[in-house]
Image (cartoon, coloured by chain):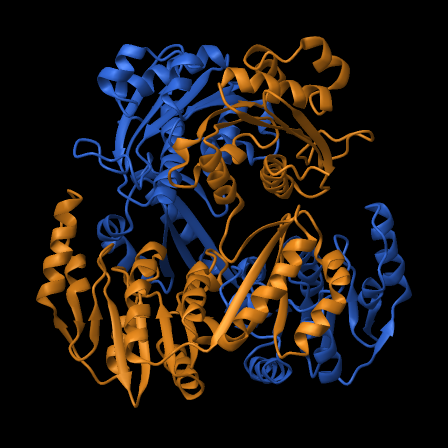
Chain colours: A blue, B orange
Amino acid sequence: MNAHILTIGDEILVGQTVDTNSTHIAKQLNSIGIAVSEIQSIKDEKLHIIDSLEVALKKNDVVIITGGLGPTNDDITKAVLTDYFNDELVINTKVLQRVQDFFVRFNKPFLEVNRYQAMLPKHADIIINDLGTASGMWFTKDSKIVISLPGVPYEMIGLMVKVIDKLRAQFNLGNLYHKTILLQGIGESYLANELEEWEKEIQSKGITVSYLPSIGIVKIRLTGNVNDKVYILNQLNVIEGRYPKQVFGYDDDKLECVIGNMLKLENKTLGTVESCTAGALSSRIVSVAGSSSYFKGAIVSYANEVKRNLVEVDSEELVQFGAVSQQVVEQMAVNGLKKLNVDYCVATSGVAGPDGGSDEKPVGTIWICVATNDAVHSKMFNFGHSRVNNIESTVVYAMNYLRRMMLNLLE
Amino acid sequence: MNAHILTIGDEILVGQTVDTNSTHIAKQLNSIGIAVSEIQSIKDEKLHIIDSLEVALKKNDVVIITGGLGPTNDDITKAVLTDYFNDELVINTKVLQRVQDFFVRFNKPFLEVNRYQAMLPKHADIIINDLGTASGMWFTKDSKIVISLPGVPYEMIGLMVKVIDKLRAQFNLGNLYHKTILLQGIGESYLANELEEWEKEIQSKGITVSYLPSIGIVKIRLTGNVNDKVYILNQLNVIEGRYPKQVFGYDDDKLECVIGNMLKLENKTLGTVESCTAGALSSRIVSVAGSSSYFKGAIVSYANEVKRNLVEVDSEELVQFGAVSQQVVEQMAVNGLKKLNVDYCVATSGVAGPDGGSDEKPVGTIWICVATNDAVHSKMFNFGHSRVNNIESTVVYAMNYLRRMMLNLLE
């Protein structure tokens, strides 16, 4: 079974917004064995919408459309689809009630423009939106399905849960099997080179291998048939055995969750003292729900003055070695243990750029340290990226450095 | 002049990666007056690539392709395009030298797989990649142009600078004019309702109006001809006059930059004391290059213990009013002024969720405070979103709250 994802609205085409909706929908469809053959973004233009819809329906069983359902005048998707399916817009009293309740709940005045949100095609299945005022619509024609969802990401995400359930109930799905292994701290080309023979062997069984690099992380995804599941899992086990320092998880695992689970299991607490990352590490750790059970807090000692006064880094060493040094990052971590009263303290100090680099410490030079009451480990990295990427690299490397320390995997 | 953006690689279609490349390319093309008619993502499949290319070339003057140029075996774009344009791959000695230098510079061994990166089509224009090993390729056929770029975002971004220059040099461009005004703290439907008459008036002049909402922010974009520039700017001036609290900038302005520039002008320093945002506010402020001239640091007092010990929030008030209260958030900001030795201190404390809510303080209840030595202002918000969105809302509202305080625009 194949699907086509169609995004409507010119904000993507003018480069004003990133199309995260299609990513989410693609992931959801793939998870139930519906392959996405194409993702397409087009304007709020009636003819272009209809044209794209016809082409997509020829090649696919399902078309999922997002966008163009808002209350403003540039939103035309509902009218175009109603027309295309020879349907008519009528007031849906159940939805009207929900929309009105929605405004009462948030103590906001109900506007006339919001009433239009309850005008819906008479013959389509309406999918109730629990998080907003634009409903989902499910049209069926000649055994093909067209689903229209709002473009507001969290509303679309809420509706996709219902769409997936409905697709599952209606079709006999699921032949594709994907499994992804996640590695931190090794480059894509090195990995691919080292795994060349392994990759050939796997491909000879009809399984595809994809590499997906992002800042500090490489994902290797194997795709086969559900019958290949055991073989695929065994092959990924081989990788895990070969790269224990790098492999931190599978599929949607995140380093911040992996660390969080380890800390919870050990009943240990964590804090950070950050310079170049300036809270990016702390906020990444806290992005995990329930992190308050192990994360206590952080000190962002961005200025040297704060390193001295609040973290009590030795003034003379700060002058002698500079803020980006092993001596200073180790003091930050060790002092952080006491200041924050935690079992593990991670410290970062580096030259994020674009300014502040020198011959000795070029932009991208970063020190990472993890301290406990028993041990202090630190390491220098040179990422050599842009400011944003140096910060992201530091966050990712620091999390894996902590993971490796907890697992006794530091060399 | 029209363009089509084609992304190759199944990581987008399986939902493993978000297509930020197309957003960047679209923005760049629009900025020089090339309208993007469509963005399309397809698999690493020869026939699908050729088919899409042919359709795209029929309707457009330029096709920009990203992805599929890596050193791994699933990357086929270069071979397919070379074939499609009846070209042949030959070793490009200049590129080979650069690729070899690249590995020397980063002190990494040169692998045979990297040599293939210097095999390039003989008749295409090669666009040198200063940030990686995959070159850009510029093919011309019957006055149509096909440009292939690597999918690694920062490499593509570097190459797009050269592509834009080359397109500008080759064509007489530029009739479209876009201008976007940015508002924080007002919902899309309220704004659209209040601006209904204004919008009609503008549309009657042939200018299109688009609303783009994101967490805490609404952007209004007007698009017309370059001749409409003065009219468009005047119309946006009207909005700025009507919404002084909300309007914080234009086009690509970011709140963190706007605040940073204000602090630099006033020669003032900033710090934060964060609970629910846990460093997200601090790291957002520091994402701006040069922020070290005004940002000193932060305390992330996530646990109450850290609020008491490090921020010295009064223990009794913490028990009496709870961490999410006006009393506590004001103490956090006021004490932060001294602890961090700054002129402005912003504090946040709230229930980010999904747990921790109560009838009195449901998930999404957030206190924001800004303190100086002369004044303390605080306000409660109820965002009622998911964890990630509550944190993002707090960051965005806190930055605008500081901006408004600095401009005497707090009611």
Which of A346 and A197 lies nearest the eye of the viewer?
A: A346
The residue positioned 52% from the left and 68% from the top of the image is B178
Give the residue drawn at x 41%, y 47%: A181
Place of residue B123 in the rendered image (x, y in percent of width and height, measured from the top left): 17, 80
The count of marks equals 0
Comparing A132 with A230, the one in front is: A132
Quadrant where the C terminus of chain B sits is: top right
In the displayed structure image, the side of residue A30 where residue A143 appears, left or right = right
The answer to whether one can see residue B109 in this image is: no
| Relative horizontal placement of residue A284, taking residue A50 as reference (left or right) | left
Quarter holding residue A100: bottom right
Q: Which residue is drawn at 76% across and 56% down?
A: B190
Where does residue A218 sit, x and y in percent of width and height? 36, 48
Is B9 located above or below residue B349 in the figure?
below
Q: In the rendered view, does B138 fall on the left or right side of A26?
A: left
Between A303 and B140, which is closer to the camera in this rendering? A303
Q: Quadrant of the N terminus of chain B?
A: bottom left
**Residue A203 at x, y = what percent?**
32, 62
Query: Which quarter of the picture shows residue B51?
Result: bottom left
Quadrant housing residue A136: bottom right
Left or right: A228 as drawn, with respect to B249: left
Which x, y percent locates residue A285?
51, 32
**Residue A11 in view of the camera:** yes
